[in-house]
Image (spheres, rainbow, N blue to C red):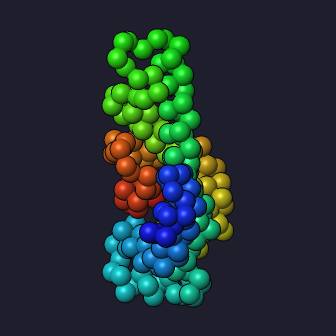
Amino acid sequence: MGLYRKVVGRGEGMAAVPLRTLGACCSISLTLPLEVVVTRVTTSRPPLGATVAVKQLWRERGLASFWRGWGVSMVLCLNPALMLTAVDWLRRLALALQRLRGAPNGVDRRQMSWVQALVVGAVAKLLTMCAVYPLVRGKVLLQSRQGGASGVLGALRALAAREGLGSWYQGLTAQLSKIDCPHDARWPTQLSPAQLSSA
């Protein structure tokens, strides 16, 4: 990362997004089997032990079962990039409004106040969360159920047919209460699989 900073220089913030996304993809590829097992253990009724969950997953599709939801996990790696894009867009909008309204004397019109920054961060996270939440829910449903629909889109279609489109956002309000504006762009991991998969 030191060499990367020397090469990229001041633009490191936005330019680092592809590198961080690649790092997240590699990390998720390595840890996804553990996530799948944990999801199966925490969402099963009656509860399963880890060993039973591993055997159950192996019987379903062999080794491939442990990487269930890999494709959508790769898409969700773009969440930090979406968040940064939303923050940048909202920041420019806030500064444009500030210039139109006329800032008080002594206030730099090119900078946001801490209150504006807090609001911009919260709104950006809210927008990105609402955009990707159905994918997170579909991924957890896919990992927690035996057999069933093929793929995340199949799981979401089956859920919508059974409970309506609003079911894609079940658990979102609990997640919204955990918004941490300053730095958190990895929100999908904060909600428990049981909350996401409950039907």
Nearest to the observer: residue 17 or residue 186: 17
Quadrant of the image occupied by residue 139: bottom right
Q: Position of residue 156 (x, y in %)?
A: 61, 55
The number of numbered discs placed on residues in the rendered structure image is 0
- Where residue 13 appears, as percent x and y from the top left, is 49, 52
Relative to 189, 83 lies left or right:
right
Instruction: Please indicate, yes or no, whether residue 153 appears anywhere in the rendered image.
Output: yes
Q: Looking at the rendering, which quadrant does residue 51 occupy?
A: bottom left
The answer to whether 49 is drawn above or below residue 158 in the figure is below
Front residue (pair 104, 31): 104
| Identity of the residue drawn at 34% across and 17% down | 106
Name the residue at 45% across, 76% down.
31
Vertical position of residue 154 compared to residue 92: above or below: below
> In which quadrant of the rendered view does residue 164 lie?
top right
- Relative image position of residue 81 (x, y in whole percent): 55, 52
Q: Is residue 56 above or below residue 129?
A: below
